[in-house]
Amino acid sequence: MLRIYLDQAEWVDMSKYRTGHREGGRFQDAYDLSTRLVEQGDISFVISTAHYYETQRRPNPTSRRDLGRTIADLSKFHSIAPSHVIVPAEIRAYLTGQPVTSQIEVFGVGFGHAFHTDMKLPEPDPTLSHQMSPTEFARLGELVRYEAELFVLAAPPEADAAARQMFETVNKIHDSAQRFADGQTTLGQQIDELKVRHKLADVVAGNEISNIMGPLIIECAQLGFDIEDLLRSRQAILHLMENLPSRWVESELRRVRLRNPQQPWVKNDLNDILALSVAVPYCDVVVTEKQWAKHLNDLGIAKRYNTVVLYDLADVPEAIVTATRTE
């Protein structure tokens, strides 16, 4: 099955066509082909935690719900595991050779998989199974699960209190994104002050290692590896980073952005980088902002993971047709 990841802007474009927006016409082919192939089970659109955050942040309830339904109906709530689940598996893969996909389910369904949480969403009252046929009860279960998942993705207009609470929670998360942007700006300034821009790859790799030190220590301890030996030299650190796919994508995107101090960091950069770090190594097609698509292609990252990276939703039909021909 072909796995496709769209960033939030591309989902907005898809929704423009579905809702009859005047700017949606150029995305008709993408929407129609995607809808047909999703129903046939040939392709899967996957969403991440970033889509939940960004969709719930839309203050207009009608717009939020329209976008949510577009995402829900095409993705079927198929989701990709978060980085805090993928990274330990990548470390184990590096240390033992056991593939990531044999350790964890990279792809799953629903809010629970996207956030790696055991929180249960509503299910139909089991006693109703005695009052309905098995087919009717199964259908009821599907409807209840759909509405529950949609509620978490995009709270409806009538749920004002819940929507406000979700909006406030997401805004707190978005505040952390601003801190990330500020931190990257500060890091860039420190690199200039210390005159180590020529060692940018080493600086970013070291910073990434510090970010994953927790799971790195745990995995080494459990598997009997000496972490000091693992990080014994510059070459060893870079070799480790290059073999942790999600960490390599993230570090390379951060490096290329830090390479250009004139380009300011913004809040959305955190969501973009976190989402792309897991989408690019594990999905077949990724559609993202033009700047990220250019970096991913120019740096050879897309080719490294055999991923088609685009920046225009209108190009998706050709990518799907080409990819399905070669499967």
Image (cartoon, rainbow, N blue to C red):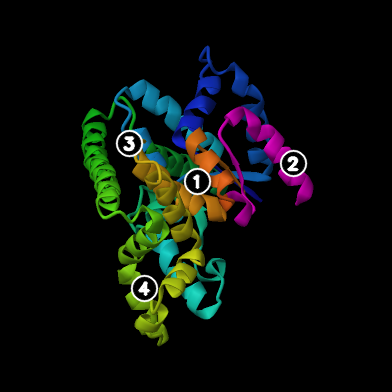
Q: Nearer the viewer, residue 36 or 158?
A: 36
Q: Which mark is residue 137?
A: 1
User: Please, what is the three-letter code of the amino acid marked with disc 1?
Assistant: Phe
Q: Residue at x 46, y 70 (%)?
A: 240
Q: Which of the marked residues, 3 or 1, is nearer the chain's N terminus?
A: 1
Residue closer to the observer: 298 or 111: 298
- Where in the figure is residue 273, as x and y percent of width and height? 41, 47
Left or right: residue 26 compared with residue 162: right
Residue 202 shows in the view: yes
Residues under numbered marks 3 and 2 in contact, where contact means CB atoms less than 8 Å apart: no
- Label whose residue precedes the other's in the sequence (4 or 2): 4
Q: Amino acid at mark 2?
A: Thr
Q: Secondary structure at mark 2?
A: helix
Which is nearer the eye, 145 or 82? Answer: 82
Which mark's residue is nearer the viewer, 3 or 2?
3
The residue where tag 4 is placed is 216
Q: In the displayed structure, would residue 4 be above or below residue 80?
A: above
Which residue in the structure is indicated by mark 3?
Answer: 264
Report which residue position mark 2 lands on.
Answer: 322
Q: Nearer the viewer, mark 3 or mark 4?
A: 3
Q: Residues within 10 Å of mark 3 (few under 14, many from 20)?
A: few
How many angstroms separate mark 3 from mark 2 (CA)? 36 Å
Q: Residues within 10 Å of mark 2 (few under 14, many from 20)?
A: few
**Disc nearer the start of the sequence (3/4):** 4
Mark 3 to mark 1 CA distance (whole Å):
54 Å
The answer to if 97 sits in the magenta stretch is: no
Q: Which residues fall within the magenta stretch?
A: 302-327
Main SS category, magenta section: helix
